[in-house]
Image (cartoon, rainbow, N blue to C red):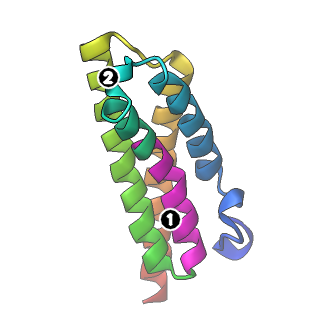
Amino acid sequence: MTTHGRVRHHEDLEAWKVAIALAKGIHRLASRLPQIEQYGLCAQLRGAATSIPANLAEGAARGSTRDFTRFVSIAQGSLAELETHLVLAWELYGVASDSTLRGRIVSLRRMLIALRAALVARSVRRD
């Protein structure tokens, strides 16, 4: 959030920046999976990772706190989905995320929780 609690642009959000970095790392990780997973687990990993910053951008652009809150919740769901796909990548193929990716996931989860809480609090203050 920026001046007066409003997001001027999604690129102002630290969570969006971390989500972009995470998505780039996930795309690199997915390329290490077997070719047979190109349209399966690779696509699922990439889709979930890409969905996180995309939902933050869309929510910030909507202009209403209620919509933004909903899109942050969707981003949280995509992060949980991504974590599940990473477990499968490890258990099926031994492809593990590095400490940087794991750190970004933990940081991003915390950021999304805090962002959603701030948006809910702002919404409650307005009512």
Vertical arrangement, residue 42 with respect to residue 65, above or below = above
Q: Which residues are magenta?
A: 48-62
Identify the disc placed on residue 19.
none
User: Who's the residue at 32% across and 22% down the image?
Assistant: 36
Residue flagged by tag 2: what amino acid is it?
Answer: Ile
Please tell me in which quadrant of the rendered image residue 70 appears: bottom left
Find out whether residue 82 is within the magenta segment: no
Picture coordinates of residue 56, whole percent (x, y) = 53, 60
In the displayed structure, would residue 73 be above or below residue 82? below
Which residue ends up furthest to the top in the rendered image? 94
Give SS at disc 1.
Answer: helix
Asked whether residue 59 is drawn in magenta, I would say yes
The N terminus appears in which quarter of the rendering?
bottom right
* Residue for badge 2: 36
Quarter residue 117 falls in:
bottom left
Instruction: Decide which of 117, 67 is in the foreground and name it.
Output: 67
Q: Is residue 65 left or right of residue 3?
A: left
Query: Which residue is located at x 39 percent, y 31 percent?
Result: 42
- The answer to whether any part of residue 12 appears in the image is yes
Q: Which residue is mark 1?
A: 118
